[in-house]
Image (cartoon, rainbow, N blue to C red):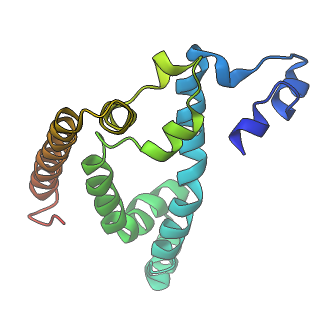
Amino acid sequence: MVRMFLSPVGPLNRLLGMNTNWMTMPSAFRTIYIASGIWQGAGWASIMYTAALSNASKELEEAAIVDGANLLQQIWYVELPAIKDIIVIQFILQAGNIMSIGFEKAYALQTDMNLPASEILSTYVYRIGLLNGDYGYSTAVGLFNSVINVILLIFVNWVVKKLNDGEGL
């Protein structure tokens, strides 16, 4: 889908009046990767947060309106506490995956021309381990990545417990 959208005859080039192959530009890889990640996560996040917002107390919303709360006060005092637990859980889970950027999407977007910008830890482990046959080194790099993820997860959970009155994941 991303390749079709960014192809030389795709809608982005038609809109800009250009004929550029964005997938071969190393300088464009990070922007493409980040924008597609935001687009990918927006749907799932909207489902989760909408479901959490449906759990907000209607009586509390009505009481805030009767008391004269403006829209920002309603969001801050009624809706934000309703989704606080989802925010905390999502933050902890995402912090645990900081080092695991995502092999599948990076590998799918990778070309020989954008390889200097698109090489991430997981594609590096794949290339060294499976393509070059250095299984020991790639296993050590993968283990190091997992250890760093666990340390980050424990640290973020500790920070959340300190900021959230002893409640973490």
Q: Residue furthest front?
A: 133
* Position of residue 38 measured from the top left corner of the image (x, y, whole percent): 55, 44
* Position of residue 162 measured from the top left corner of the image (x, y, whole percent): 9, 54
Q: Nearer the viewer, residue 96 or 126?
A: 126
* Position of residue 127 measured from the top left corner of the image (x, y, whole percent): 38, 32
Answer left or right for 65 relative to 133. right
Residue 19 found in image quarter:
top right
Q: Is residue 115 above or below residue 71?
A: above
Q: Is residue 29 above or below residue 146?
A: above
Q: Is residue 64 above or below residue 135?
A: below
Residue 12 found in image quarter:
top right
Q: Residue at x 19, y 66 (%)?
A: 169
Q: Residue at x 52, y 43 (%)?
A: 105
Q: Residue at x 48, y 25 (%)?
A: 118
Q: Residue furthest bottom?
A: 59
* Position of residue 153 measured from the top left corner of the image (x, y, whole percent): 17, 51
Answer left or right for 86 relative to 36. left
Q: Nearer the viewer, residue 21 or 28?
A: 21
Label tally: 0
Q: Residue at x 43, y 43 (%)?
A: 103
Answer left or right for 138 relative to 147. right
